[in-house]
Amino acid sequence: LPPRGEERGHVPTRPSHRWQMYPTPGKDYAAALGAATGVILASEYAPTLLEDVRAFLANVAAGKLPKLKRVVVLSHIGVERRDVEPWKLMNRKLVLGTGVIGGVAKPGGAPLDRWWDAEEAIRAAATASDDVAWTYTIVRVGDLRGNGPTSVTYGDAMLALVDNAFDVRMQDIEIEEGDCFEGYTKRQSVAAVMNRMLTTPSFRVLNKAFSVVSTGPVDRERRRGWDVAKGKSPPPISDKTVDEELQPKEEEETAPQGVPAPVPT
């Protein structure tokens, strides 16, 4: 990703939906912004996500994404339950020291507040006027687990083993609109869900937030043969699986579904 600054904050996608990575905010990156129809904003660190959202919206306001149609943003479950446990404890405020004599301590903690602030910024920008041409979807997840196909090596070997096991055992997902669930979410599954939210023709995802958690463990047969430590990871969830999870639940089947949403082209 580009360094921090006005150009940092998101990875635009070409019309073909192939990921484009730009190490510096040069001409290629500027050109990609101009061509981008869909953008995904994601960070596991809430303050960074908030910075990225603000930088992205500044680029939008400056007219640098004239073809933008869809935006998908990562957030965290619990943002609407910050006043009850365990989310209240998770969202406690802290004071961060600088480690430097004479340095001024800064406020920290309250990650759910920061994720909520990022969500609110997106919602406000998307509904600022009738002239806004893009829609958003927010994907709220639990704490992220799993190493995925890249076999990330952690300094804590035991944690790496736990995440490897999580990848193999927790292969399924559950999706609900709003702020739901408790639990963890697999990184690889989050990536698949966010990509599908960007490309799905479903009308029901527009300008809404969904919660996603991993479920399992899957049966022994589905766990057989995988070893993340050796680069043998279960495949990511399919678009079909995401689409099935997005279908209206039984109590929602009588609600009008509208028309298909435009897909970035």
Image (spheres, rainbow, N blue to C red):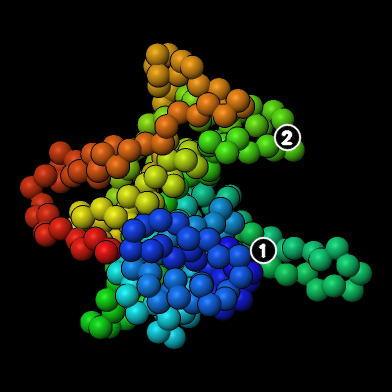
Left or right of 146? Residue 248 is: left
Q: Which residue is rendered at x = 15% and y = 42% of the image?
A: 251
- Tell me residue 106's x, y (percent): 73, 70
Residue 53 in view in this figure: yes
Residue positioned 61% across, 65% down in the render: 23
Q: Which corner quadrant holds the N terminus? A: bottom right
Q: Position of residue 216 (x, y in %)?
A: 41, 26
Residue extending furthest front? Answer: 28
Work out whether residue 22 or residue 255 is closer to the camera in this orientation and state it: 22
Q: Is residue 122 above or below residue 252?
A: below
Quarter in which the C terminus is drawn: bottom left
Spatial separation of the CA atoms under disc 1 and disc 2: 25 Å
- Picture residue at 86% right of the left edge, 63% below the top: 99
Closer-to-camera residue (81/145): 145
Determine the secondary structure under disc 2: loop
Q: Report the side of 103 relative to 148 (left or right).
A: right
Q: Residue at x 25, y 53 (%)?
A: 200
Q: Which mark is residue 132?
A: none
* Disc 1 target residue: 108
Q: Residue furthest right?
A: 101
Q: Is residue 179 visible?
A: no
Question: In the image, what residue type sits under mark 2?
Answer: Asp
* Residue 22 point in image, percent of width and height: 55, 65
Quadrant location of residue 45? bottom right
Q: Residues within 10 Å of mark 2 (few under 14, many from 20)?
A: few
In the picture of the structure, the residue carrying the numbered disc 2 is: 156
Q: What type is the residue that disc 1 sits on?
A: Gly
